[in-house]
Amino acid sequence: MARASGHIPFCLPWTDGQEIREVTDAVRSGWLTTGPKVARFEERIRRLVRARHAVAVNSCTAALHLSLAAAGVGRGDEVITSPYTFAATGEAILYLGARPVLADIDPVTLNVNPEAVVAAVTRRSRAIVPVHIAGLPCDMKALIGLARRRRLTVVEDAAHAMGARVEGRPIGSLSDLTCFSFYATKNLTTGEGGMVTTDDREMAARVRRLSLHGLSRDAWKRYTRAGSWRYDVVEVGFKYNMTDLAAGLGLAQAGKFSAIQARRRWLARRYSTLLAGCDAFDLPVEQSGLTHAWHLYILRLRPGVLRVSRDRIIDLLKEQGIGTSVHFLPLHLHSFYRRAFGYRPGDFPHTERESARAISLPLYPGLNRAAQDRVVGTLLDLVRQHRR
Ligand SMILES: *Cc1c(COP(=O)(O)O)cnc(C)c1O
């Protein structure tokens, strides 16, 4: 763990003997690719989020791609999402030849503003991809209501939202399809991995088939006693299946997920308590009826308080051995999106303004109290030194 003078990384996975045992067990079993551990991991996640079906894949990017494909999104369609997100959300839409149509955020929550989504709907709209930024659920009631009225499919980018709830109902069982990420930095990790959850049996079957070359049902069993060597390619699919090695990691992580979440919540609330008195920061909000998954603790610098820029604060924290990050650079300002769609600064002002003043602080179960105190102490010192 980081000592007073040591480096405090931005994030660290929480792994121990359980992960080592599960992965070793997978190696010993001879099942290196998709096998019994993947099936058990799917069942664990399915129950955790209270969905009828869960299909494991090798990333959330793959989960988004296949969910949109299963929803029938294709060339010429429009998919509405937020510019305040990671590259993956836009790419999954582009893979299908569809157009990402962006709708600006609510500057308080950083989540897509349902009114902006309403304004973005056209005759070509096919789906909405809400992104639960940092683990705070989007306004799902408004978005699902709109989707019903306009016959759109909702595919949630829940990369940050494993463990989040709306009125007690877990994210993962609310809309048509939900996509989770088990990337190394995420709340529950398999190194690389993802999952699609849905209550729709046919969507689940389609996602599963697409995840393994479009092969006929249960083709993965072909090397087991129960399987047959015969298979049929039903449609063009992809190579997105999860391995038993990854699922082993996931099973160990799932076993301590409630402890992971409790620790993240405790740390996040402690940040908010310790930073509440400082006028230099706007702190992340919790909202009544919503359970925050606390994937990220995104602080925002209040304009006009400091003489130095956000980027300079990040560098100064780094010099003091404190790792931070920025979530996210606006999707529409990346050079590809400017070139392909003609986006310019000013197109989504809330996204641009909030992104430009955001700093994500270290947040992970292994962050101890002393390390967190040092992050807070260093930040408050910087504010004193650089006040206007
Ligand atoms: C991490 C992340 C993804 C992609 O997840 P992968 O599992 O790495 O593909 C998608 N969307 C958001 C918002 C993310 O943070």
Image (cartoon, grey):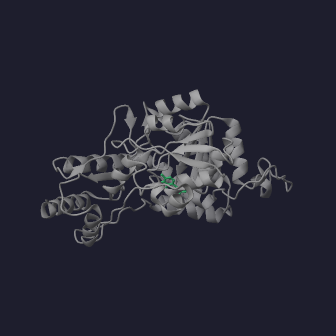
Whether residue 223 is visible to the viewer of this picture, yes or no, is yes
Relative vertical location of residue 92 with respect to residue 72 in this rendering, above or below: below
Residue 220 figure quarter = bottom right
Total residue callouts:
0
Residue name at image x 15 percent, y 48 percent: 277
Q: Residue 102: horizontal and vertical position, in percent?
A: 50, 46
- Viewer-closest of 19 and 163: 163
Q: Is residue 38 left or right of residue 305?
A: right
Relative vertical location of residue 195 with respect to residue 190 in this rendering, above or below: above
Residue 135 figure quarter = top left
Residue 136 figure quarter = top left
Relative vertical location of residue 194 with respect to residue 116 in this rendering, above or below: below
Q: Residue 122: horizontal and vertical position, in percent?
A: 58, 37
Q: Is residue 319 left or right of residue 355?
A: left
- Viewer-closest of 189 and 25: 189
Residue name at image x 46 percent, y 52 percent: 85
Q: Residue 284: horizontal and vertical position, in percent?
A: 31, 46
Residue name at image x 61 percent, y 57 percent: 58
Q: Quadrant of the C terminus?
A: bottom left
Q: Residue furthest right?
A: 230
Whether residue 259 is visible to the viewer of this picture, yes or no, is no
Residue name at image x 13 percent, y 64 percent: 385
Q: Residue 305: horizontal and vertical position, in percent?
A: 17, 55
Q: Quadrant of the N terminus?
A: bottom left
